[in-house]
Image (tube, rainbow, N blue to C red):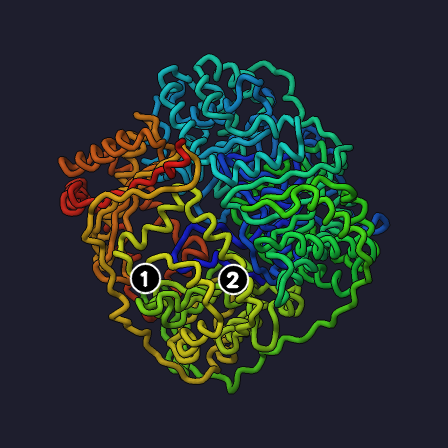
Amino acid sequence: MQALLPDPISRMHVSRASLSGNPAGPYGRASRCAMWPKPGTPRQAAGDPPLPAGADDKQLPVQHSCAIKRAMNLRAFFALTSALAVTLPAPLLAQAPEYQHPEQVIHHVTAPVNPALLEAFGIAGSDLPFDTGYRIGVLDNGLKFIIRQNGTPAGQGMVYLWINTGSLGEEEDQAGFAHFLEHMAFNGSTRVPEGEMVHLLEREGLAFGPDTNASTGFDRTLYQLNLPRNDPALLDTALMLMRETASELTLDPDAVAREIGVVQSELRVRDTYQLKNSLAQLKFLYPGAAFAENWLGGSPESVGTATSQRLRDFYTRWYRPDNAAIIVVGDFDAAAVEAAVRQHFAGWTAPTVEEPANAGPFDFARAGETQVWLDPALAEQVTATRTAPWIDRPDTVATRRERVLREIGYAIVNRRLQRLQRDENPPFRGAGFVTEEVFQEARSTSLVVQAAEGEWQRGLAAAQEEYRRALQFGFTPAEVAEQVANLRASLEANAAGAATRDNRNFITGALTLLEDAQVPTTPQSALERFIQHEPLITPEAVLAALQADAVSLDNPLIRYSGRTAPAGGEAALRAAWDAGMATPLVAREEAAAGQFAYTDFGPVGTVASDVVEPLLGIRTITFANGLKLNLKRTDLQENRVSVQLNIDGGELLDTRENPLATAMTSSLITGGLGAHTLDELVTILAGKQVGINIGAGDETFQLSGTTTPGDLELQLQLIAAAVTDPGYRPTGEEQYRRSLANFFARINATPASTLGNALGGILSDGDPRFTLQSPEAYQALTFAGLRQSIGERWQNGAMELALVGDFDEEATIALVARTLGALPPRETAFGEYTENRVRSFTADRSPRTLYHQGEANQALIRMMWPTRDGEDLRAALELDLLGRVLRLQLTDSLREQLGQTYSPVADSNTSRVYPGWGTMSVGAEIAPDQVEAARAAILDVVSALRAAPVDADVLQRARAPLIETYENLLKTNGGWIGLVDRAQTQPDRLQRYMAGQETIRSVTAEDLHAMAQRYLDPAQRLEIVVLPEPAAQQ
């Protein structure tokens, strides 16, 4: 079960990191963000379940910036999110290994796979049954292809070009060229003129960024197209563009010169305190290693030396068919896709060259060194690390068996640390114990502790004690059973939902096959292996596997990062570690698990009305107690049910007198339930596919989760318990308060965060509801105050419950009748809150200048105009399209023509909560000396849109992706839930959806011209510039 612990200032809609954690565990499938590397860590193969997790055990508070492209798998240091999560025993639907005893091997019979192909993909020696749903092959020129026919979501597909090189393929004088070349893929080729590739795809409905993207890592480069349709012509276009990228880039000298500024802009924007901390940490842990010294993207200086010929040298060396692969997954005929791949790529030829150098060298004897790294925005953190040689583990039944054992061990250690984190007086804000493989050359074990300010020594001692206790005394049967239950539940859920796995699941399986020689297996075969071997997962086996894998933390490398230096400096850090290692230990006592206390909510509720609305076939039911229930059964994702409850109130309860009334709502689950602490729930609900997220939306409180049909009753009981008996325990308050110092320390750390935290107050003339309050105001918040603010609404406010997915309608109605439908009578109508719906745009349009505390080469300009609310569908869509047109035009001018910014911003926001409220926002992150030029470029674009209707092609490129969004919205349960959740109390949303596409298609260039003339008067703009603090410029 999952729950979220957001940033303490969630009320302010500040940008926040995902808090759900990496579902695959320390060795599992990594979630990769845009251009970072994977240091060769074997991830899970396709078809296997998620690793067992000790709730938020992977949520280490490590400083991390997902800088240029995708995230590192050195999860001990980087891929662990900097925000702390609260996660109950969620059987997350990802991939994981299995346990198998050597004497109990299960032999599977599958369709034969050409042994030569298995050899080519590096898996010929594995005894795992290959999932023959994957169609794999190698062309005569050496190009590999992986094809998977898949109908989820229907009518869509994904095409990837994988190049087996990244920054590690660069020579010393080529730093950043791998990433630069990725940029040039969008800037002209033999058959596609400069700038036309993106335009071509936009006309087909692919948005630049979400659907058309690329990423560069240390040892791979990926080009990605998400196809909104599965027609053969679009697939042919996608493959043509991938072939152009692979071998036909023109690398025009003028285009290279223009792109230098764009690449430098990206590096400038990413150059934050998180990145600097990460780089310093890598160089401390792996001094002299190629991947630590030759960081992704290079530097502005090295990028500035790029020329057409120098990029071509890199291009011709590494972009070769024998060093590349094509991946196609989606609703296509696999044989037809293979024929198309052969047609486009068979003629690609290039000479072979030597493989790139290793990522090292690594000094495995290095120990006893200490580093202190300070930055005003960093949280207090101590990391102890040792590195040892990599252990080669080919992907076999036996190695997956071993992996499960050690992952259970890590999960239990982290589960213990999590318990300490949830004490009434916790020793740390978060802690974790992980071992991570580094480029198949090394492995590093780390104990990571994030403490409250000034409490690092106490936190480190507590974490050390738990780490040592685990490795000395091992684990209890109950601890192992909890993790096994979670793993079993995940395997069962994966097997039950195998037929409707998402395309991304198979993309990840293909990448792990290419990069880590991990055999794709089916979820059913993984479940069968686990069933046979589960009895052999014992505490003794788990401890032995953990001890064999973890590098001993004797005399480790110790690194401190934070805002202020530790008292006593490096010597104090080393002395504290040595003292902790000498502390006497006692074995852990077995803790008894309780029973879930919330199964009886009173007499079964009765149905007062039951009708099916005609537009989308949503079944709408009202219970006698006032509960509204909306049901939409789908076959889009087998064995999954999405549940969302709306309760009247939300942020409309925040007033000018009490602007933080609902601020702690998202932390409510940290206080547990009346009968159970949050930690007790983790154990009680082990092995159950249930979860709960609680938050305050614009006008309702929302409680949501995703479950299976078999666990739906428990999911409903959990939500009903959260409504009727929230725990409000002080432990939740303490976790909230401990997050505040870090939040306020970094609110001005970058131009974007500075603007984001000040913008609400500027636009509203300081209206407290939309203005960041003082740290003291947040420190003063309590659960008692939250109960006083929201308790009456939770007890009496109108409720609307939505369920979407794979369920039996009659059985589900009966389950609701025994839970939320059985609660005492409530109000039936959601409140108007007329006074709190008043929101106005400032009349003071004088230019504003804000100052950030980040790098001196970073600035930001933002222009905003008041528009209108979203009640009129056509007007709202016209403004949306106008914003999209602005973004396209700004991309062409600011990025492509002037080379000033990596990602211009242009967005329309039309509210349906605050009458009359709407904004158009336009801007970019730039260098301080580019402010005047950026201002002129933005105003030129705005003035041109006001002067004459936009070109028809630009309108089509803005319109097509929006139409495809509508076309594909109801192909996922997530799309349906947005319509089903308020189907009774806001039925006009259904009507708006039905009318949306036709309305979008009918919008003309003249309509947008009129909108621009009406709302985008340059004289009426509010302009905000964010500059570095004067001291930072000196």
Question: In the rendering, at what x and y percent does residue 193 appear?
Answer: 34, 21
- In this view of the protein, which residue sits in the foreground, 17 or 755? 755
Q: Report the side of 824 relative to 109 (left or right).
A: left
Question: In the rendering, at what x and y percent does residue 36 appear?
Answer: 54, 35
Tell me the quadrant of the picture where the C terminus can be found: top left
Taking the image as drawn, is residue 689 in sight? yes
Q: Report the side of 972 relative to 587 (left or right).
A: left
Q: Amino acid at mark 2?
A: Tyr
The circle drawn on residue 768 is 1
- In this view of the protein, which residue sits in the foreground, 404 or 140? 404
Residue at point 31%, 29% (across, down): 930
Question: In the rendering, at what x and y percent does residue 236 appear?
Answer: 43, 31
- In this view of the protein, which residue sits in the foreground, 72 or 422? 422
Within 10 Å of the Cα at label 1, are there few (<14), some (14-19), or many (20+) other Cα atoms?
some
Q: Residue 266's image quarter?
A: top left
The circle drawn on residue 907 is none
Q: Report the side of 870 relative to 670 (left or right).
A: left
Q: Report the side of 481 relative to 1031 (left or right).
A: right
Asked whether disc 2 touches disc 1, contact meaning CB atoms under 8 Å apart, the reply is no
Question: In the rendering, at what x and y percent does residue 671 appear?
Answer: 55, 69
The residue pinned by badge 2 equals: 736
Tell me the quadrant of the picture where the N terminus can be found: bottom right
Eyeballing the image, is 661 above or below 1000?
below
Eyeballing the image, is 612 above or below 609?
above
Q: Amino acid at mark 1?
A: Pro
Within 10 Å of the Cα at label 2, are there few (<14), some (14-19), or many (20+) other Cα atoms?
many
Residue at point 46%, 21% (across, down): 301
Q: Residue 300's image quarter?
A: top left
Looking at this rendering, what residue extends furthest in the front direction? 568
Mark 2–mark 1 distance (CA, rounded to whole Å): 21 Å
